Amino acid sequence: MTRLKSRFLVDLLMRRTEAAGGFAAVLAKGDDTSGVILVQCSDRGEPGPLLERRFSIDGTYIWESVGPDDPKDGESRENYRERRRKADPDLWIIELDIADAPRLVAEWAALT
């Protein structure tokens, strides 16, 4: 099975978000080929979940909600992102600001 490169997937997610009227930005650039993708969701500036695309044990990719339980705890959220970035310098961190960002991510994931 051919795996799509992380950079291609990030670009696709950003374009889909912008086409739907949202805002998307790369907060940290990761490895173009195989970097893990962390999506910071928000809706009109209100923080939502952090979603991470991970390789599962069965050889497929899954999306998991990660980080602090309270997305409005900005300090805990920032600390989590910093810890993940230090542990994995190949990590992509993407910000999406659009209504129901987790739904958009799920639709995008179905394409990949």
Image (tube, rainbow, N blue to C red):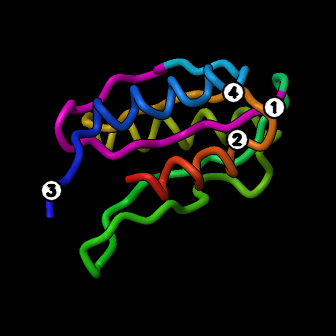
Q: Which residue is mark 4?
A: 20
In the foreground, 72 or 26: 26
In terms of sequence position, does the residue under pointer 4 or pointer 2 come before the other?
A: 4
SS of the residue under disc 4? loop
SS of the residue under disc 2? helix
Amino acid carrying mark 4 in the image: Ala
SS of the residue under disc 3? loop
SS of the residue under disc 1? strand
Amino acid carrying mark 2 in the image: Ala
Q: What's drawn in magenta, residue-wise?
A: 26-43
Q: Which residue is mark 1?
A: 43
In the foreground, 23 or 19: 19
Q: Which mark is residue 97?
A: none
In terms of sequence position, does the residue under pointer 4 or pointer 1 come before the other?
A: 4
Q: Residues within 10 Å of mark 4 (few under 14, many from 20)?
A: few
- CA–CA distance between discs 4 and 3? 28 Å
- CA–CA distance between discs 2 and 1? 7 Å
| Residue shown at 53% from the left, 18% from the top | 25
In terms of sequence position, does the residue under pointer 3 or pointer 2 come before the other?
A: 3
Q: Which residue is mark 3?
A: 2
Q: Residue furthest bottom?
A: 58
Q: Is residue 67 above or below residue 6?
A: below
Amino acid carrying mark 1 in the image: Asp
